[in-house]
Amino acid sequence: MNAPLLRRVREAGGLHVPLGTLAELSQDPVRDLDELEAFGFSFERHPILGVAFRAPSARLCPDQIEDGLATDCVGRRVAVWNRVASTNDLAARAAGSSANEGLVILADEQTAGRGRRGRAWVVPPRSSILMSLLLFPKGPLADSAWLTALGAVAVAELVRDWTGADARIKWPNDVRVGGRKIAGVLVERGPGAVIGIGLNANVGPDDLPAEIAGSSTSMQILLGGIVDRSELAADLIRSLDRLYLDARRLGPLPLAASWRALSEHIGKHARVLLREGEVIGRVTDLDLLGGLTLVGPDDTPRSYPGSDVVSVSTL
Ligand code: BTN
């Protein structure tokens, strides 16, 4: 597939591009456009004006994702599948070799997508970002909570950049807008660390299972139109790469600070489910490495280590 030609036509923003100006990118622009159309891209062709971009393919396009990715670690290899059981499984299978650090697995559909705490992750085929990233982090970056934060911060920033919405992180791994979940992160450990990310993209109000529809949102709902999932995936890969490389240079704290700043809990009353029991109070501090501090009805601050906190729900 001719990705540079696709980029040129896409970047014209819906205006026609004369076929003659594509000659430097393609020996046969008509054949290349036919191939892109066969993949699902939509163009308007005019005998004099040339070709104009109309719509992205409903399928994730590996060539489009890799074109101009320019990352150092995350996305050094990108594998895109039509249908898999779980992208996390495929990434884990590649963990036998640390040469696979930065491998990204993407799928248009999962038949056995997993969420946290044994839940299923179900979205319509070709609707969302279903991504797993394989890393071999060292020292403090190998901490599972930090890796979860890496995924959550990358997604929250992406949603903010694309929609302008005030995306926030609900402890420990949900990204929400206005209290509705748009993405989740599932970190699984083996010889490497797999960061699985599910981000609702082209999901309409009626597309989700009834039990989560009322508490979920999507890029489509926020923007009022569909998004180009391949571009969204590429931006997410770039964002993960930037955050991970920064952390390898500067350590875990800058990301921990971003995670805290993006948290939806600070200053709010919350119900905190602990490994043993439950507490309610106002969250006064939240630290990825240190845990959570809560002021209860008796006005006394109490801290709970992060490893004891199962979930936090803002009241
Ligand atoms: C959660 O919020 O419970 C975490 C959801 C994580 C879902 C993603 S989709 C891609 C990757 N593959 C999976 O099976 N799960 C994660």
Image: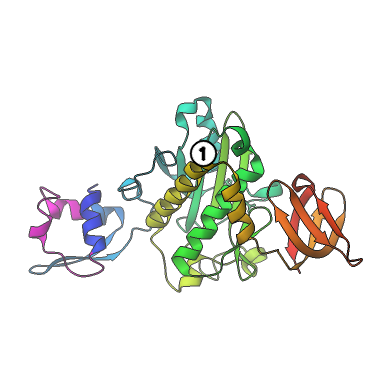
**What residue lies at 13% left-to-right and 53% top-to-bottom?**
29
Magenta highlight on residue 31: yes
Residue type highlighted by circle 1: Arg
Mark 1: give few (<14), some (14-19) or many (20+) Cα within 10 Å.
Answer: some
Q: Can you say which quadrant of the picture contains the C terminus? A: bottom right
| Residue 186 at least partly seen | no
Q: Secondary structure at mark 1?
A: helix
Query: Looking at the image, which residue sits at the far bottom?
Result: 224
Region in magenta: 12-33
| Residue 157 at least partly seen | yes
Magenta highlight on residue 32: yes
Query: Looking at the image, which residue sits at the far right?
Result: 298
| Residue that mark 1 sits on | 248
**What residue lies at 52% left-to-right and 56% top-to-bottom?**
155
- Disc 1, ligand 1: is the CB inside 8 Å? no
The one of 300 and 67 positioned closer to us in this rendering: 300
Q: With 146 as the anchor, is 32 left or right in this view?
A: left
Q: With 139 as the anchor, is 71 left or right in this view?
A: left
Colour scheme shown: rainbow
- The relative height of residue 95 versus residue 180 in the rendered view (above or below) is above
Q: With 49 as the anchor, is 5 left or right in this view?
A: right
